[in-house]
Image: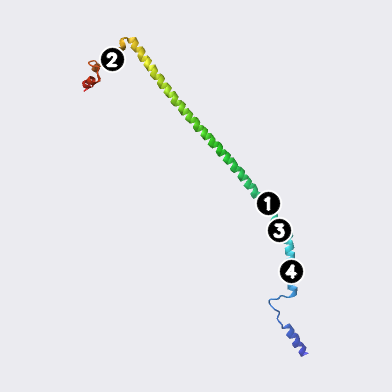
Amino acid sequence: MQELLVTLAAEEGETPSPLIPAIYDITWSAVCFVVILFIFWRVVLPRMNKLLDERSTAIEGNIAKADEAQRKAEAALQEYTAALADARKEAGEIRDAAREDGKKIVAEAKDSAASEAARERSSRGGGGTAERRREHPAMHWSSSPASRCALAN
């Protein structure tokens, strides 16, 4: 019996290899892996795909909205640029018209002054040279420019 105990002790004393697990460990690990894989495949993966699809749809929608906003902004900029060009053109036309009106007013004023002066000369009679000399006493002695300058000095 002693021999039998020694044999049993020797068989029980064998240590299993640390690199090769026991068969029951491999079996239960495989069963757990398959259950987790099945749950992941049926539950988690579809939810993840749905979430990613919603996210990509939202991103594409936002990109489309941004493109539309960009087009509207470009159209508004073109309208603004066109309106600004029209306003500058209109301002230039107004400026040119004002210059022309100013020239006409000055010409009319000159004509009016000339006609007024002619009317006064004709109403006074004789051309008014004697009257001018009476108005400017320094000028009555001589009518030449050189003598007037000599008198003024």
Judging by the rendered image, the residue that carries numbered circle 2 is 132
Label located before the other in sequence (1 or 2): 1
Q: In terms of sequence position, does the residue under pointer 3 or pointer 1 come before the other?
A: 3
Picture disc at residue 54? 1
Q: Which residue is mark 4?
A: 30
Identify residue type, mark 3.
Leu
Residue type highlighted by circle 4: Ala
Q: Residue at x 75, y 87 (%)?
A: 7
Mark 1: amino acid: Glu
Label 4 to label 2: alpha-carbon separation: 133 Å
Position of residue 42 relative to residue 74, above or below, is below
Mark 4 and mark 3 lie on one chain; the one further toward the N terminus is: 4
Q: Which is more toward the observer, 141 or 53?
A: 141
Q: Residues within 10 Å of mark 3 (few under 14, many from 20)?
A: few
Asked if labels 3 and 4 touch by Cβ distance under 8 angstroms, the answer is: no
Residue pushed farthest right?
1
Is 94 left or right of 62, judged from the image as shown? left
Image depth: mark 4 or mark 2 in front: 2
| Upstream in sequence: badge 1 or badge 4 | 4
Which residue carries the number 3 mark?
45
Question: In the structure shown, which secondary structural element does the residue marked by tag 2 occupy?
Answer: helix
Measure the C-alpha gap from mark 2 to mark 3: 115 Å
**Apparent side of residue 89 relative to residue 145 in the rendered image (left or right):** right
Image quarter of residue 51: bottom right
Which label is found at residue 114?
A: none
